[in-house]
Image (cartoon, rainbow, N blue to C red):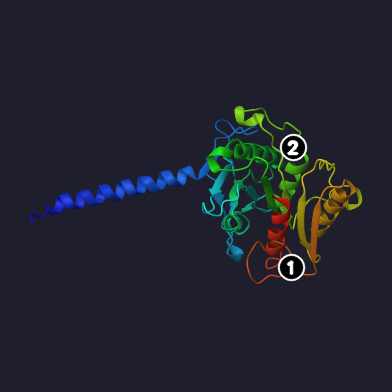
Amino acid sequence: MKTQPQPIKVMLTLCSLFFSLVFVAQAQNEDLIHIWPDKVPGETGPKHPAVVTDNHSGDVTRLTDVTDPTLKVFLPDANVNNGAAVIVCPGGGYRILAIDKEGHEVAEWFTTLGYTAFVLEYRVPEKQDGALNDIQRAIRIVRSGADEWKLDTDKIGVIGFSAGGSLAARASTRYNEETYTAQDAKDKVSSKPNFAMLIYPAYLDKGENRSLTPELNVNENTPPMFLFATADDSHANSALVMATALRDNKVPVSLHLLPKGGHGYGLRNGNPGAETWPALAETWLKATVK
């Protein structure tokens, strides 16, 4: 059998490697959606990739200086896809995003339940108005792409952690507000979540005497919510005042408050909060997202 000269073998190997890398890069790009096709509303500087901070304490990857908000797509196996979607909002005090602990890891868990999950990199630091633009646009993109992802447009929800819980609450109560100039046809669809999950939410009690933050317009049309916090969390009052407002307006609400757990635990083992909320949330989702 005639063998190929060594240089040709090397060239073929390199070509194969090149096309493999191109395929992988294309696949990765297809899983990342830049939510603003052109100029980002309210921004004057150029877009650039988010900055990974030097702080990796607690084995957490933290992003900041987000100027090009994105959605990273996590798909469930086809045999468990339930037609529902959830947009995941990591926390970080509106200064950074705990992108793995409260983002990617949570999205991967949702896919095991049959959900298509989208992790939102919203604008930070200290760009709360921009962040609201970002989540409204993100919900519209997901709802507009329902056919592509095999989703039911009435089964699109949000989940947020800490400041991400604040953002999810804002999206759930301010969906009637047009907070940015429409970009394209996607902005004609509703930005209202069908359900919301707030895990150790923060900043919901900025009203007088730690009452509900005035911007949060809770009424009978607010989507059903799952709230989870721990009593030893300095932000726990946020969940309590939100639950009260929902109850007063006859909105279905599930509130869970553990004695201990603190704040910022995500899904990771070793914390009573992290080891409790997922099972409660799964039960709630089965009863709520039908």
Quarter holding residue 156:
top right
Q: x%, y% of residue 41?
A: 64, 32
Front residue of 250/31: it is 250
Front residue of 134/152: it is 152
Horizontal side, residue 5 vs residue 131: left or right: left
Front residue of 204/23: it is 23
Q: Earlier in the sequence, mark 1 or mark 2?
A: 2
In this view, the residue farthest toward the left is 2
Q: Which mark is residue 175?
A: 2
Q: x%, y% of residue 173?
A: 78, 41
Q: Amino acid at mark 1?
A: Gly
SS type, badge 1: loop
Q: Which mark is residue 261?
A: 1
Between marks 1 and 2, how big is the CA–CA gap?
32 Å
Quarter holding residue 259:
bottom right
Front residue of 180/138: it is 138
Up/down of 137 relative to 199, above or below: above
Answer yes or no: do the residues labelled 1 and 2 have beta carbons within 8 Å?
no
Residue 154 appears in the rendering: yes
Residue positioned 78% across, 51% down in the render: 203
In this view, the residue farthest toward the bottom is 270
Q: x%, y% of residue 137?
A: 64, 37
